[in-house]
Image: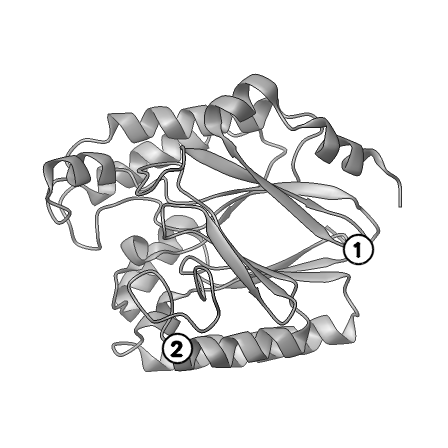
Amino acid sequence: SSNSKEWPFYFIQGADPQFGLMKAWAVGDTNNGDDEWGEEIKLAEQAVQAINKLNPKPKFFVLCGDLIHGMPGSQWRKDQEKDLKNVLKNTDQDIPLVFVSGNHDIGNTPTKETIDNYCKNWGDDYFSFWVGGVFFLVLNSQLYFDSSKCPELKQAQDVWLNEQLAVAQKHKCKHIIVFQHIPLFLKKPDEAHDYFNLEKSVRQEIMEKFHKAGIKAVFSGHYHRNAGGSYRGLEMVVSSAIGCQLGEDTHGLRVVVVTDEKIVHRYYSLNELSSQGIEKELLDMLAKQN
């Protein structure tokens, strides 16, 4: 979209459909147990049907990584990708799909080859787009997690990101919003590093850069639970999965409303969103002409 005024508007964030994880988790073999994903197909279909029924329509549907479970080179990967594409192509033609790369999509330690392969299948691993006066950035968080096999690609993303943030500043955009698979942190900016967040020195550098650039929110997945916190006005939103749950949450999607002054969001279970749609409070916000 152009830079014209289009708010308030909303989009849908989903994460981790991860075809194959439910079976792998159930049998206790996350490396090779992903040979069935019928359960995830049903959940992804339910997500698409729920989104298609929404009125007004969301501006886009972003999937924050781990599209499938099979790591690069694994046995079932191509079939998992094919089945996910078959489900997603039923998304209403007027609702663009935005894809974010996760660790299962390009590997915990990505290479030029795994990233190229992802890009052929799903589009660029990092890019930006505008909706109204809002600037969105999609990042490849694996390059922050472990770029040891492709340092030049990490450097390229860094250079690109700095250029994009300069553009955003020049255009005085309303809000800047980031999508990446791995959260900067789950609850507190200074929490210990583990599998589900970014290493502390890397995290600190990114948080400072985002804060200085005036980024309002980062939306991630990866944790298969809902979580989040904030750092100096930057909100970190961690959304649970469409697929396998690793905590107390339900399979779901996040509805994100963007108004002139703020970003308001709520996580809905798939059942709730398909049966009841978006609650009145958020619909009222969308109906307001700023």
Q: Is residue 213 above or below residue 45?
A: below
Q: Secondary structure at mark 2?
A: helix
Q: Residue at x 28, y 63 (%)?
A: 195
Q: Is residue 115 above or below residue 246?
A: below
Q: Residue at x 30, y 36 (%)?
A: 82
In depth, the one of 228 and 287 nearer the eye is 228
- What x and y, as percent, mark residue 192? 35, 71
Q: Residues within 10 Å of mark 1 (few under 14, many from 20)?
A: few
**Residue farthest to the right, as pictured:** 290
Identity, as a three-letter code, of the amino acid under mark 2:
Lys
Q: CA distance from mark 2 to mark 1?
A: 31 Å
Residue at the spot of label 1:
261
- What x and y, as percent, mark residue 201? 41, 82
In depth, the one of 113 and 272 nearer the eye is 272
Identity, as a three-letter code, of the amino acid under mark 1:
Glu
Q: Residue 156 falls in which quadrant of the image?
A: bottom left
Left or right? Give the position of 238 relative to 281: left
In depth, the one of 212 and 281 nearer the eye is 281
Left or right? Give the position of 240 relative to 28: right
Q: Is residue 92 above or below residue 110?
A: above
Where residue 200 is drawn, which disc sits there? 2
